[in-house]
Amino acid sequence: MQAPIEYSIDPGSSEAFAERLLELINGGSLAMMVSIGHRTGLFDALAELGAVRSTELATAAGLDERYVREWLGAMVVGRIVEHDGEAGTYLLPDAHAASLCRKSPSTNMAVFAQYLSVLGRVEDEIVECFRRGGGVPYSSYPRFHEVMAEDSGQSVLPMLESAILPLVPGLVDRLRLGVEVLDVGCGRGRALLLLAERFPRSRFVGVDISAEAIDWARAQAHERGLTNIGFEQIDAAMIGDEHRRRYDLITTFDAVHDQRDPAAVLAAIAECLAPGGVYFMQDIASSGHHAGDVGHPLGPLIYTVSCMHCMTVSLAEGGAGLGAAWGRERAEAMLAAAGFGSVVVHQLDHDLQNDYYVCRRSADDIW
């Protein structure tokens, strides 16, 4: 019999729980303002200017002062920005700027705040899904790929060559010499574009179902003058038809769990690997069980994004609706069923959100 889940708040204390709910509502409201501060560049301007009046901040950021002033009110009462009432100035402390600015030396948490407004856009559609089933299509999320690209831009791209690629022994050397690489569910292709620039002797292909994402990636490849990379709009489950036994390396970055048919996608990836090839999968770190995820530092965010995006976009296509918190146990079982006889799972200190899987058809497939 499974032990009961222990909660930090006494379930019988209605007053304590009400206080917690009030804190959550205030926090959610503040998160929306943090998203706006990020998108408008207000945090970046504050960090550069130091103590400043609202009129000066608005001018520097090229924004309407009345809106900037109201936003500053939220930042002050939310204890993010310090305010000198007598001088009428506002200051973003360096300790806060470190988690809120694009030039941050650490993770910019304001990037994650954007998910709330993106997901809030489809709340009415999600409520209907609760009542009738089905799902919300990708087309209802015009900014999701943009936010995902920015998210991966700080969690994946900075660590790609120094920490992530070395999880596959010998991979960096092989990329330098020249291999065939496929990224499935590439989104805007930022990781693949970086690899194409860094390893000109290798050839790269990115596939994604989103026309908007593929158009953006193609434009970036053209702008950068990259001739060793291409992008295709295609259902990931269909890649085996044209790419069989072709690729030395196949990657997916946070892409498998929201597919219409993730089992078929994994099987297609196995078919597309050249002899001795490696499949590298980054996906959400989760136990796959509600009880096991209670202590997850990003648990509420993961399940919310899953319910309001990952699961529902799959269900919208009549898919499996696997969800973001599918968990390592199920992932390993599905990889085995797809034909991967060797699966090694890694975690990285800088990334609380993801597990990293190095998958081969056989343990003997070592470069």
Image (tube, grey):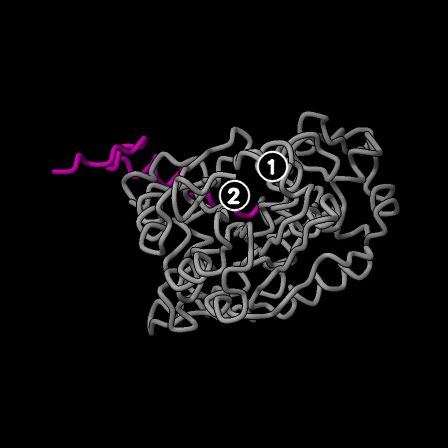
Q: Is residue 141 above or below residue 33?
A: below
Q: Position of residue 52 (x, y in %)?
A: 83, 34
Q: Position of residue 192 (x, y in %)?
A: 65, 51
Residue plotted at (36% across, 48% down) = 331
Quarter-of-image position of residue 88? top right
Residue sitting at the far left: 1
Return the residue nearer the eye: 76 or 104: 104
Return the residue nearer the eye: 339 or 143: 339
Q: Is residue 217 above or below residue 52?
A: below
Number of residues whose C-alpha sits closer than 10 Å to that of mark 2, classed few (under 14), some (14–19) or many (20 or more):
few
Q: Position of residue 124 (x, y in %)?
A: 47, 68
Residue plotted at (32% across, 30% down) = 8
Element assignment for label 1? loop
Q: CA distance from mark 2 to mark 1?
A: 8 Å
Residue type at mark 1 is Gly
Relative side of 289 to 355, left or right: left
Labelled disc at residue 233 = none
Quarter-of-image position of residue 323? bottom left
Give the magenta part as a residue range.
Answer: 1-30
First along the sequence among labels 2 and 1: 2
Instruction: Look at the image and say whether residue 27 sits in the magenta stretch.
Output: yes
Residue plotted at (55% across, 48% down) = 29
Residue type at mark 2 is Asn
Element assignment for label 2? helix
Q: Are marks 2 and 1 in contact (CB under 8 Å)?
A: yes
Q: Which residue is mark 1?
A: 78
Return the residue nearer the eye: 251 or 8: 251
Q: Which residue is mark 2?
A: 26
**Quarter in which the N terminus is drawn:** top left
Can you see residue 308? no
